[in-house]
Amino acid sequence: MHRFFVDKQNIQEENDVIIITDSDDVKHIAKVLRLKEKDEIEICDGNNNEYIGEICYLDKSGIKLKILTKYKTLTESNVEVTLFQGIPKASKMDYIIQKCTEMGIHAIVPVITERTIVQIKDKKTEEKKVERWQKVAEEAAKQSKRGVIPRILEPLSFNELLNSISDYDLMLVPYEKELKSSMRQAFKHKKLIKRIGIIVGPEGGFEENEIEAAKDCGAIPVTLGPRILRTETAGLISLSIVMYELGDLGGV
C-alpha cells in the first residue's frame, strides 16, 4: 500500500478525515499512481501514528480521505541514534541519508571538519542543501515504513559538535587508527543508553588533534575491523552494529 506523511494539523480524527495538501504528494497520487475515489492509502503523522484512509475526493488542490483505521507504528527503535557525518563530496550524502533512514536513524547532522572538501558558501546555499537532504530522508522514510522522518539538521563545525557530545549517553567515533576498542566493549561500560551519537569523518578521515579533542569531551574511538571503509559506508555499518547490539536487528 502506498504511504505518505501528513502534517498532524491535516488529520481531523474527530471527523474521521485526513486532508493531503502537499502539491508534490497530490500530483504523485493523482498523476503518477493514478489513484481514484475508493482507493486506500497509508498515512503517517510523523509521530508514530498510522492511518488507513479511503480516498473520497481528489483534485489538483488537494485530496480528502476517510479514516478507516488507526494504529501505532511498530518500526521505530527505542533508542535515538544521531549520525554526525563529515560532509562528503558529490551525491554521497544522499546515499548516506537514504540508507541510514532505512536502518532507523533518528537524525543526521552534517559536520565540517579540517579535511572536509565540500564548501558551503553562504546561508542560502546551506538552506537549499538541507532542504534537499530532508526530502531524501522523507522519501526513504516512506519506502521503509518509518513512523517518523529523520531530521537533517544544519551543518555544524567540528568545535560545535564537541560542545554537544555531553548531550549523549554514548558517543562513538569509528577511527582507522583505533585497533583495540570495539563498539561492543564501549556498550559494556554503559548501563542505561537512550541517546547515541556516531561521528564519521569525510573522505580524508580525521586529523589526530580532532580525535584527541573528541576523546577529551567524552567520545570513544572504536575500530570497525581491519579494513578501511569509505565515509559513505562507515556510518551505515556503525549504525547497523549499534542497532544489532541494542536488539533492534534481532540481537540479544
Image (cartoon, helix red, strand yellow):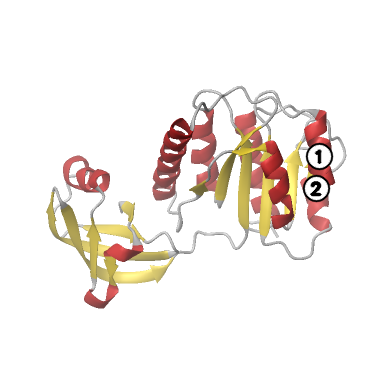
Q: Is residue 241 visible?
A: no
Specify the quadrant of the image occupied by residue 112: top right
Kind of residue sitting beneath label 1: Ala
Tell me, yes or no, whether the two marked residues, 2 and 1, touch with CB atoms within 8 Å.
yes
Indicate the secondary structure of the residue bearing disc 2. loop
Note whether 186 is above or below 74 in the view shown. above
Note whether 188 is above or below 179 in the view shown. below
Q: Residue at x 58, y 43 (%)?
A: 109
Q: CA distance from mark 2 to mark 1?
A: 6 Å
Q: Nearer the viewer, residue 47 or 164?
A: 164
Q: Which residue is mark 1?
A: 213
Specify the quadrant of the image occupied by residue 62: bottom left
Residue 76: x %, y % from top left: 52, 59
Q: Which residue is mark 2?
A: 217
Q: Residue at x 78, y 55 (%)?
A: 187
The crowding category of the residue bearing disc 2, from other C-alpha atoms within 10 Å (few below 14, some 14 to 19, many at least 20), is some
The answer to whether residue 150 is left or right of residue 157 is: left
Residue 67: x %, y % from top left: 25, 69
Specify the quadrant of the image occupied by residue 193: bottom right
